[in-house]
């Protein structure tokens, strides 16, 4: 590590020692690492989600399932319901698979980046983060915050995602053998609190004197290619009430929102609009629509209310009557929670519906 690299690394660690965020899954700077289970769980939750959003979920999970063995033994439906609202539900399915794989190893996580990659759902970033933070292994940890800091620090003009290899190489060169976990978390905190996407606070940055991007205009970096417009898909969701209960189905285990409770729908997907076929015969009426953004497409979902009487045709093998008073416990994905709120609001305005 040359002198300029040492200067950046040492400056970052000094700043982290004084300014580290207190987060429930962390240990304080310089203290023994946190439990691997807590590091892994938080990192999976934090993928494409904010720290503020993750905090309550992390507390719920660790109170309900305090160890990886407890999570491995949990009912999959309960875990999916507890995850509802965090989005990217494939992460929740991978969470369960990984917990069971670790439980099969006696509840012990592997302690190297390479062996962690062999667990279900652990990609390069998560494996590096767990290795560095939980096991103090030297690993290049690169999330979106770190990408931004490094792109600015070195004024990397190559647009993302093509610049990812260069950014990772720069992080690897900066990462120390001693305290790699603190270094990784320091870089994350710097990106989250100082080197922010908009209006970076360069006067407060511990790396300002070494930052090439600051001299060139920090907000120019990282350079990003223009995003393609996402396609708009359309579908329908069906609100079927019997007394004080609503009909919910369990979605297929694989695919979008797999394994989760939901309102019945008409088969929309990322590739196609819904087919518009009603689940049972009878009188239906539109009740407005909700819109939701997924990673690769947007969805406009029309809500249809049932006022017929052909309820006997509903298949008890695929669904259940869920009490309306406990609907918030069903763990509906955000999309269907939006549709349910729309339906309930309509019923309050017109109790005869």
Image (cartoon, rainbow, N blue to C red):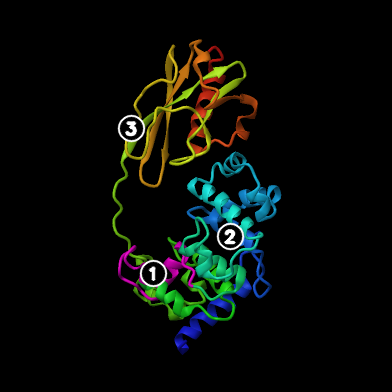
User: Earlier along the polypeptide chain: callout 2 or callout 3?
Assistant: 2
Give the class, few, some or many, for how many residues have Cα within 10 Å of label 3's Cα (few <14, many ≥20). Answer: some
Tell me the crowding category of disc 2: few under 14, some 14 to 19, or many 20 or more residues within 10 angstroms, Cα based: many
Q: Is residue 351 left or right of residue 66?
A: left
Real-space Cα separation, disc 3 to disc 1, in angstroms? 42 Å
Tell me if residue 144 is in the magenta stretch: yes
Q: Nearer the viewer, residue 66 or 21?
A: 66
> To which residue does mark 3 refer?
273
- Residue at image x 45%, y 76%? 172
In this picture, residue 340 sits left or right of residue 38: left
Quarter where residue 165 is shown: bottom left
Q: Position of residue 100 (x, y in %)?
A: 60, 52
Residue drawn at x 37%, y 67% is 164
Magenta residues (range): 140-165
* Disc nearest the viewer among 3 and 1: 3
Residue where numbered disc 1 is placed: 218
Mark earlier in primary sequence (3, 1): 1
């Amino acid at each position: 590590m040359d002198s300029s690299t040492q200067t950046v690394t040492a400056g970052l660690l000094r700043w982290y020692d004084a300014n580290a965020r207190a987060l429930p899954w962390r240990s304080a700077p310089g203290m023994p690492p946190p439990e691997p289970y807590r590091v892994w769980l938080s990192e999976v939750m934090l993928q494409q989600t904010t720290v503020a959003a993750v905090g309550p979920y992390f507390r719920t999970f660790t109170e309900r399932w305090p160890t990886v063995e407890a999570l491995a033994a949990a009912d999959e439906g309960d875990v999916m319901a507890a995850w509802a609202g965090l989005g990217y539900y494939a992460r929740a399915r991978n969470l369960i698979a990984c917990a069971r794989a670790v439980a099969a190893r006696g509840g012990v996580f592997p302690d190297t980046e390479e062996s962690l990659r062999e667990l279900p759902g652990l990609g390069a970033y998560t494996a590096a983060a767990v290795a560095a933070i939980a096991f103090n292994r030297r690993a290049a940890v690169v999330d979106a915050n770190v990408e931004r800091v490094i792109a600015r620090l070195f004024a990397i003009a190559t647009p993302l995602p093509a610049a990812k290899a260069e950014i990772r190489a720069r992080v690897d060169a900066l990462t120390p053998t001693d305290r790699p976990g603190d270094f990784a978390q320091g870089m994350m905190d710097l990106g989250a609190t100082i080197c922010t996407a908009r209006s970076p606070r360069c006067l407060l940055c511990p790396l300002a004197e070494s930052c090439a991007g600051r001299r060139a205009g920090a907000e120019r970096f990282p350079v990003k290619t223009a995003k393609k417009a996402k396609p708009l898909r359309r579908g329908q969701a069906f609100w079927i009430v019997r007394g004080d209960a609503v009909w919910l189905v369990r979605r297929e285990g694989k695919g979008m929102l797999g394994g989760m409770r939901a309102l019945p729908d008409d088969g929309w997907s990322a590739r196609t609009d819904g087919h518009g076929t009603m689940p049972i015969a009878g009188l239906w009426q539109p009740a407005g629509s909700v819109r939701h953004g997924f990673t690769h497409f947007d969805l406009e979902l029309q809500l249809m209310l049932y006022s017929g009487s052909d309820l006997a045709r509903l298949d008890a093998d695929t669904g259940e009557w869920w009490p309306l008073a406990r609907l918030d416990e069903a763990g509906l994905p955000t999309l269907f929670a939006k549709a349910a709120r729309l339906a309930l609001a309509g019923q309050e305005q017109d109790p005869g519906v």
